[in-house]
Image: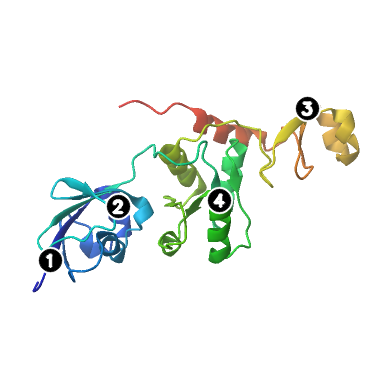
């Protein structure tokens, strides 16, 4: 390779963002001498929100740093759990993560979601409400206008949920949010919602909750066992190594 060159070493946790030819211990990269290190890293496929630290010759540097020919660069992933500028975390999920949104709400995590918002609208929404945007769209994470975002790992909803809980460790309060709209649930007397119930539900159940935002009524019905399994898996302490 002729001209200036950097030697970049990506942590293995970031290899999923790299082209297969770059998934190795050391990646030699031609350098134009003027681009920021953050630009170089993103040009190889790794969104900056997924980077925890950039290290050049053993010292931490910001993404705006302009390296020199021959620099050895270390690219480390975001720490887990990741410290955030918002506490507790508030999430916004893109249109492809509807099942994950419902599961986070089931666990009482503040989770905004609509299935009809384009990328521009999602960035505006995340910025306006200071929500962390969760997505599997790497291009969306590279938008400079987005204040805070993260990539969700996993193809299945259970894998995605485990990834988000592991990375951000949000406080959980199961059964306190509406899975349809994210509103808060409150206990309600059966008499106050009886007119809204089907005859079979009215006959079989006595404990109800209602969403303060949309009015949806909840009870532990036939699907409760599956939901209880999701909750139990989420609140179970992680094994110590």
Mark 4: give few (<14), some (14-19) or many (20+) Cα within 10 Å.
Answer: many
Which mark, residue 92?
4
Q: Nearer the viewer, mark 1 or mark 2?
A: 1
Q: Name the quadrant of the N terminus.
A: bottom left
Which residue is nearer to you in this view: 9 or 237? Answer: 9
| Secondary structure under the numbered disc 4 in the rendered image | strand
Q: Mark 1 or mark 4, which has the lower sequence index?
A: 1
Q: Mark 1 or mark 2, which has the lower sequence index?
A: 1
Asked if one can make out residue 69 in the rendered structure from this viewpoint, the answer is yes
- Residue 86: image location, x then y, percent: 49, 40
- Residue 23: image location, x then y, percent: 22, 58
Q: Nearer the viewer, mark 3 or mark 4?
A: 4
Mark 2: give few (<14), some (14-19) or many (20+) Cα within 10 Å.
Answer: some
| Secondary structure under the numbered disc 1 in the rendered image | strand
| Secondary structure under the numbered disc 3 in the rendered image | loop
Q: Mark 3 or mark 2, which has the lower sequence index?
A: 2
CA gap between label 1 and label 4 equals 39 Å
Q: Which residue is mark 3?
A: 207
Q: Is residue 147 left or right of residue 197?
A: left
The answer to whether the residues at label 3 and label 4 have Cβ atoms under 8 Å apart is: no
Which residue is painted at 11% across and 69% down in the image? 4
CA gap between label 1 and label 2 equals 21 Å
Q: Which residue is mark 2?
A: 14
Asked if one can make out residue 95 in the rendered structure from this viewpoint, the answer is no
Q: How is the image coloured?
A: rainbow
Q: Mark 3 or mark 4, which has the lower sequence index?
A: 4
CA gap between label 1 and label 3 equals 67 Å
Q: Which residue is mark 1?
A: 5
Mark 3: give few (<14), some (14-19) or many (20+) Cα within 10 Å.
Answer: few
The answer to whether the residues at label 1 and label 2 have Cβ atoms under 8 Å apart is: no
């Amino acid at each position: 390779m002729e001209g200036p060159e950097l030697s970049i070493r990506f942590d293995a946790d970031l290899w999923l963002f790299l082209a297969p030819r770059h998934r190795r211990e050391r990646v030699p990269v031609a350098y134009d001498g003027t681009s920021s290190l953050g630009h170089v890293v993103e040009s190889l496929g790794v969104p900056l929100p997924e980077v925890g630290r950039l290290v050049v010759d053993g010292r931490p540097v910001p993404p705006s740093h302009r390296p020199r020919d021959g620099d050895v660069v270390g690219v480390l992933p975001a720490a887990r759990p990741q410290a955030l500028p918002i506490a507790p975390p508030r999430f916004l999920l893109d249109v492809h993560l509807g099942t994950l949104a419902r599961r986070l709400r089931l666990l009482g995590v503040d989770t905004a979601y609509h299935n009809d918002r384009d990328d521009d609208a999602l960035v505006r929404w995340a910025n306006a409400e200071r929500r962390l945007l969760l997505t599997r769209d790497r291009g969306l994470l590279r938008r400079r206008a987005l204040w805070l975002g993260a990539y969700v790992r996993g193809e299945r909803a259970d894998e995605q949920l485990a990834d988000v809980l592991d990375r951000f460790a949000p406080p959980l309060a199961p059964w306190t949010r509406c899975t349809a709209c994210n509103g808060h649930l409150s206990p309600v007397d059966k008499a106050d919602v009886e007119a809204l119930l089907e005859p079979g539900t009215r006959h079989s159940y006595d404990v109800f909750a209602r969403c303060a935002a949309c009015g949806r009524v909840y009870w532990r019905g036939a699907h409760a066992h599956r939901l209880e399994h999701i909750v139990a898996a989420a609140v179970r302490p992680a094994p110590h190594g």
